[in-house]
Amino acid sequence: MTARLPLLIGLLALVGARATSERPGDTGRMIPIAGAAWAGSSVNVVANIRQSVFTHAGTQFAAFYDADRYMVLARRARDADRWETRRTPYQGNAADAHNSISLVVDGAGILHVAWDHHASPLNYARGVAPGSIELGPRMAMTSQLESRVTYPQFFRLPGGDVLFLYRDGASGRGTLALNRYAVATGAWTAVQTNLIDGEGERSPYWDMTIDRQGTLHLAWIWRESPDVATNHDICYARSADAGRTWSDSEGARVAVPITARTAEYAARIPQGSNLMNSPAITADDEGHPYVTTYWSAASGAAPRFHVVFRDGPAWHTIDGPAQSEAFTLAGGGTKAPPISRAVVLVEPIGRSRQIHLVYRDAGPSGGGRVIAATRAMPGPGTWTIRQLIPGPVGSWEPAVDPEAWVGLREVHMLVQHVTQRDGDDRTGAAAPTPIGLLVWRPGAEGLR
């Protein structure tokens, strides 16, 4: 780790430096935020946060744990390279990668933050004024189902209200809860206290996105026990009314709570297939859903990413980039496989589309770097692979600023070199490392 630290410090100082790619505009640039952030787990840069970076009205906000495990908030003008940071009085169990920080800014400009959750009481606070990175006191939302919170996710609706999605319960026996914050009243209400029910036998591991029309798209896999090897299948549901009612991909109403029996299955994947949780989901400008995660398509095959999508009368699955390294996904706790989870983004190009997968690959071809894989659809099925920055990032995973992508077609992600130990985050320590923002514009000739 210490040998890599100078490399990352140099990496964070690069602005517009080229990675190993032959095409112009393929690289990202780094904007430093802080010189010392918690690196003993992947808690600052773990996938499926939704989100650690968020832009509102020309200002970008971010959050991370510092070397002493205090939550730090940061903001910058979108076109500036200098961040203002503020250490909050709130600490988290940063040694556990589950205990990530999620934030959003509502339509009135108020920052909302949730942090430090792994089947634990709700930790939630909001900014004291529009645009502020000073938080008020810790508070409840609805005072319901707030004692065993895990995987908090914020989403902003087109009108400016905010949704909060989280697991109530524990691995293998959890349910999904959904709250809504109204800007007009400044209050939270429960929309669903049991949206997806594992019926005491399994848990959903999910991701959600909101498309340009305001439709919610929800994808999840099932897990039968704390052992990740019991992950199976990819399911889907959507809502056109901010989560009050739900339907399948054809518009047929689905009763809540959704169970293993009533769910729509976008892809059938058996247990023991090295299926990673959680899936990532996005939607194109026309509201078609795209889901990605990795699994082994056949017994003994190396896990690889796949993209499951629906843009017609049926679900389709295409293979992602081939992975050269075989591995087995099994056991409990936070895992440390050679490839990270990915984010999936869809970009309209004329009458066609481009799919981007962003992830980290520690195999022989990836070198532990941040990778972007792009494929045209419809097209011949060839993926173009890019390394977005020159150095390795340890156990980093991607989480994208949704507003930067929708408004600018730019990928903005926190990047930090971190250590993640398989099965138990607490078995060791790592020296703090710098943290910064990676900005990448697909296909651009240059970055601003």
Image: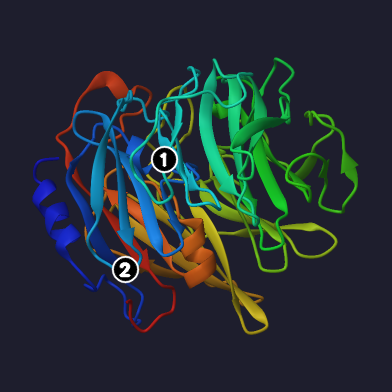
| Quadrant (top left, top right, bottom left, bottom right) of the C terminus | bottom left
| Quadrant (top left, top right, bottom left, bottom right) of the N terminus | top left
10 Å crowding of disc 2: few (<14), some (14-19), many (20+)? many
Q: Which mark is residue 127?
A: 1
Q: Find the distance from the CA under tag 1 to the CA under tag 2.
A: 31 Å
Q: Position of residue 347 (x, y in %)?
A: 57, 71
The residue at which mark 2 appears reads as: 28
The residue at 36%/43% (across/down) is: 45
Mark nearest the camera among 1 and 2 is 1
10 Å crowding of disc 1: few (<14), some (14-19), many (20+)? some
In the foreground, 160 or 426:
160
Note whether 128 is above or below 391 in the view shown: above
Provide the secondary structure element on which disc 2 rests: loop
The residue at 48%/24% (across/down) is: 139
Query: What is the three-letter code of the residue carrying label 1?
Result: Gly
From the viewer's perspective, tell me whether residue 348 is left or right of residue 405. right
Q: Position of residue 83 (x, y in %)?
A: 24, 56
In the foreground, 246 or 180:
180
**Where, by quadrant of the figure, is residue 285 drawn?**
bottom right
Q: Position of residue 226 (x, y in %)?
A: 54, 20
**Where, by quadrant of the figure, is residue 117 drawn?**
top left
From the viewer's perspective, tell me whether residue 430 is left or right of residue 51. left
Provide the secondary structure element on which disc 1 rests: loop
Query: What is the three-letter code of the residue carrying label 2?
Result: Gly
- Which label's residue is closer to the chain start, 1 or 2? 2
Note whether 268 is above or below 82 in the view shown: above
The residue at 57%/38% (across/down) is: 275
